[in-house]
Amino acid sequence: MVRMVQKQTDLSIVKKPKIKLDVPTLLSEWSKTYNPNGKPDWSHIFPFYADDIIFQDSIQKIEGIDKFKAMCNRLTKRCKSLEMDIKNITRDDHVVFMEWKMTMSFRFFPKKPIFGSSRLTLNEDEKIIEQRDYYDLWGDIYDGVPIWRGIYRWFMRTFFG
């Protein structure tokens, strides 16, 4: 009598191969995220982020992949359109820098460009553990409002320039 035994594999311990986040991969994947004809879709880049991602920009600091996904989804709901043009990108060891121009429009406002940069820090598994975005949100917004543009630029030159 022959007895067959089925061996079960615990899929939670099977490691997926690392995908190196090199410059061509970053350009390819991040360029798919934003488009001029509709809303952004981040779903294909979420796997590049670590579960304990720390995201920070001029407005907020977010910790954890679930909160990061929720932030991205909120931005998708608020924007009528969102485009990103990556101007420059470089990687040195576990740090990536991107310079970009993001053009967004909300329900009642015309398209407005925001210029900035992002620093991505990668862990040993090539996952993004920290993303820090740098941009002048208020300056770029006020530049599009004729009365406020002059006041804001005068204020910045007088007190900080």
Image (cartoon, grey):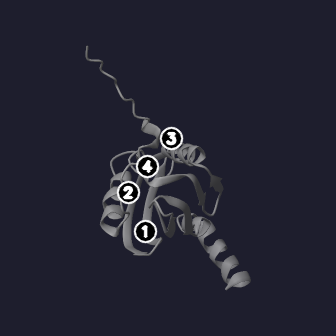
**Chain-order first, disc 1 or disc 4:** 4
Category of crowding for the residue at label 3, using alpha-carbon neighbours closer than 10 angstroms: few (below 14), some (14–19), many (at least 20): few
Going by the numbered disc 2, the residue's amino acid type is: Lys
Discs 4, 2 touching: Cβ within 8 Å: no
The label on residue 18 is 2
Q: Is residue 45 left or right of residue 66?
A: left
At mark 4, the secondary structure is helix
Q: Residue at x 45, y 71 (%)?
A: 96
Q: Is residue 7 left or right of residue 80?
A: left
Tell me which label, 4 or 3, sits earlier in the chain: 4
Q: CA distance from mark 2 to mark 3?
A: 32 Å
Disc 4 designates what residue? 47
Query: Cα distance, mark 1 to mark 3?
Result: 22 Å
Q: Earlier in the sequence, mark 1 or mark 3?
A: 3
Q: Nearer the viewer, residue 11 or 40?
A: 11
Task: Where is residue 64? Give x, y as percent.
Answer: 60, 49
Query: Residue at image x 40%, y 60%?
Result: 84
Q: Amino acid at mark 3?
A: Lys
Q: Is residue 107 above or below residue 21?
A: above
Q: Secondary structure at mark 3?
A: helix
Q: Nearer the viewer, residue 62 or 1?
A: 1
Residue 35 visible? The answer is no
In the image as oriented, which residue stretches furthest toward the right? 159
